[in-house]
Amino acid sequence: MLLAMMVLVMTGCANEAANTTYDEPEELTDNEEIANEGQINDDADESEEDEAAGESAPDYEQLKQKVVEQFEMASPTVWGENIDGVVTELNTDDKVVALTFDACDGTPDSYDEELIDFLIEEQIPATLFINAQWIEENREVFTELADNPLFEIANHGYYHKPLSVSGESAYGIMGTENVEDVFDEIYKNQELIKEITNETPQYFRSGTAYYDDVAVDIIEELGLTAVNYNVLGDAGGTFNESQIVQAFGSAQEGSIFLFHMNKPHSDISNGVKEGVQMLREEGYEFVQLGEYDAHF
């Protein structure tokens, strides 16, 4: 039943004004809207953003060249969300779940403060996958979140693109076109987060959560782990409260949930409040991904 609702309601993290033709045969998930919302007009600002992200630094260029030389002749064989090398659950019998929240919208009013305040008040740890455009729009908030030990900051890409070395698309959104683009999508945001927080993210989730196998190898080469999910929490903010609670009901030991923290006008906050209480009553505890890194 949940899968049927996913197919019907999914629009993901998208720009609501966009009319997109979906050219992927894969089953729709919340990433449809994630992808559309991540499709931004970056040409005019790209040179300025590159400088801010440290692209011109010698170590950046040297590392990029090394990665390009290592992978430029590799040919991808797999394209999707749940492929080898992408973590979707914690391999544990402990009664724990990991709540992950994507911030994939650089538009104004893209911070669900009520949701985050609830997590803080109830001392619920979580892993936050943050996109560069969201950081730039919400820099002060981002700094506060990064300083809070409840939250583990992870990398959600620079332009919020599907991660491909050959220009594959997901839900009608063109991905990165080559190895160089893959590197920039990962590492520019990695450098931005490190510049602000003095911490280096360990985990990466692409815009749309789609990858090819070569891109996953590049993620690993850069010292990160690709992480998706096995519980669709909010369908990009389109689930109503009861549907979100129903998603919580599918939890099992080691589940990784995907929610969004950039949809303040959705039912996510109310659904998470009810779902967290339900799982607590069932004896579940909440953990950051880093606490169970050895169980990937």
Image (spheres, rainbow, N blue to C red):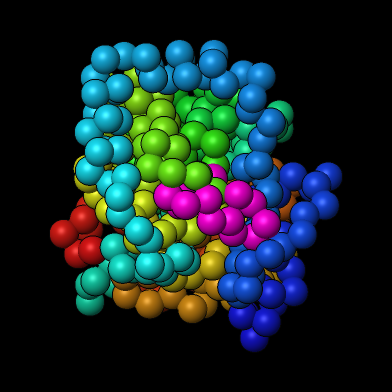
Asked if the stretch drawn in magenta spans residue 67, the answer is no
**Residue 83 x/y as whole percent:** 37, 68
Q: Residue at x 47, y 66 (%)?
A: 80
Eyeballing the image, is 263 above or below 145? below
Q: Is residue 206 visible?
A: no
118 lies above or below 53: below
Judged from this view, the residue extending furthest toward the front is 73
> Where residue 11 appears, x then y in whole percent?
72, 60
The secondary structure that most of the magenta stretch takes on is loop
| Residue toward you, 217 or 93 | 217
Asked whether, in this view, residue 8 is left or right of residue 97, the answer is right
Looking at the image, which residue is at 37% across and 61% down?
76
Which quadrant of the rendered structure holds the C terminus?
Answer: bottom left
Q: Nearer the viewer, residue 86 or 72?
A: 72
The total number of labels drawn is: 0
For residue 169: magenta?
A: yes
Identify which residue is drawn at 49% across, 34% down. 158
Asked whether residue 21 appears in the rendered view, the answer is: yes
Q: Start and end of the magenta stretch?
A: 161-174
Quadrant in the picture for residue 45: top right
Q: Is residue 150 left or right of residue 174?
A: left
Relative image position of residue 121 (x, y in whole percent): 47, 43
The image shows residue 209 at horizontal and vertical percentages of: 49, 57
